[in-house]
Image: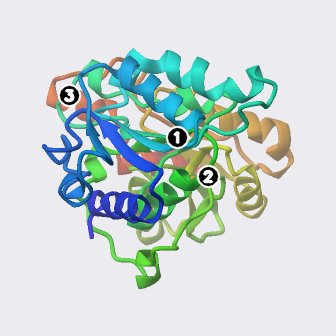
Amino acid sequence: MTVRQALNSAMDDEIKRDPKVFLMGEEVAQFDGSYKVSKGLYKKYGAGRIWDTPICEAGFSGLGVGAALFGLRPIIEFMTWNFAMQGIDQLINSCAKFCYMTGGDFSSCPIVFRGLNGPTAGAAAQHSQCFAAWYGSVPGLKVVAPWNCEDARGLLKTAIRDNSPVIFLESELMYSVEFEFDKSVMDPDFTLPIGKAKIERKGKDVTIVSYSKMVGTSLEAAATLSKKHKVDAEVINLRTIRPLDRKTILESVKKTSHIVSVEDGWPQSGIGAEISALMMEAGFDYLDAPHERITGADVPMPYSVPLEKAAVPDTQNVINGVLKALNKK
């Protein structure tokens, strides 16, 4: 199964399970979605549950928030999270803050905003940035970033059932990637907890923390480090950006005494910067070396193929960061 199919099956399960769930966005219905994530859902459930919208993110975001505040469970698809900037006032000021600003009178806003996030391929500066740190800084939101099929299916089902607004950040470059997984993942009741990271590879020498597509890059680096450098790396898949699973990170660093964070977003105020703050506030005494950050380049994403490639972390960047943290290079 591909990640695209895992996301599709999660929405299918939840639309079937709960009559209050519906999907809304540009081209999600009759066209089966711009990236075919909603393929077949319109044919199966009809226009009452799968809604095509005009190209107006502010409009259908606000419509979704209103529907959620009055008891429905919308799934709002953005063709890309870059386009969500047109509707960001609805996500932040109308959605994330509503419980607080009504003194708890509106205590739930069960809505999922989902779509592709981060670098793609040849999409240039306005369609390639990572919004994990943007939305991860906002009280009132939960922010999820899946990597594989298990993540995509389990976390999306949980997000749809959650009574809080959830920002669901998908990677276009992962949509067609196939993963094997236990058959229990396809159970209609299978879910994964928001706020809990997963240790994808156990190790004792260094902790590598990542999310979304960069988890795969980190695992590839860990395999090479083991084979060529005799370094046993532990790889943590964050799964959730907010709330961040600080406990899992700290427990790993207690064991390894070294940490490297990997992300394809910008360095300043990024997820790695938050992890650095965690190390200073709660993990300093466990470290034998400074935290190493591997990030995307601090530039708008280039359109040029070789420059785009240079702007995104690769396996060798992660290996170099680990060797530096271990004072082996």
Q: Would you name the residue on which mark 2 appears? A: 326
Give whichever of discs 1 and 2 has the lower sequence position.
1
The residue that disc 1 covers is: 111
Q: Tag 3: Cα neighbours inside 10 Å, few (<14), some, or many (≥20)? A: some
Q: What residue type is labelled 1?
A: Ile
Q: How far apart are marks 3 and 1 (CA)?
A: 28 Å
Image-based side of 268 in relation to 279, left or right: left
User: Which is in the foreground here, disc 3 or disc 2?
Assistant: 3
Position in image of residue 204 (x %, y %): 66, 68
Give the quarter of the image for residue 47.
top left
Q: Is mark 3 on a helix, strand or loop?
A: loop
Q: How far apart are marks 1 and 2 (CA)?
A: 43 Å
Q: Which amino acid does label 3 sit on?
A: Ala
At label 2, the amino acid type is Leu
* Mark 1 touches mark 2? (CB < 8 Å): no
Determine whether the residue tagged by mark 1 lies in a helix, strand or loop.
Answer: loop
Front-most of residues 94 and 228: 94
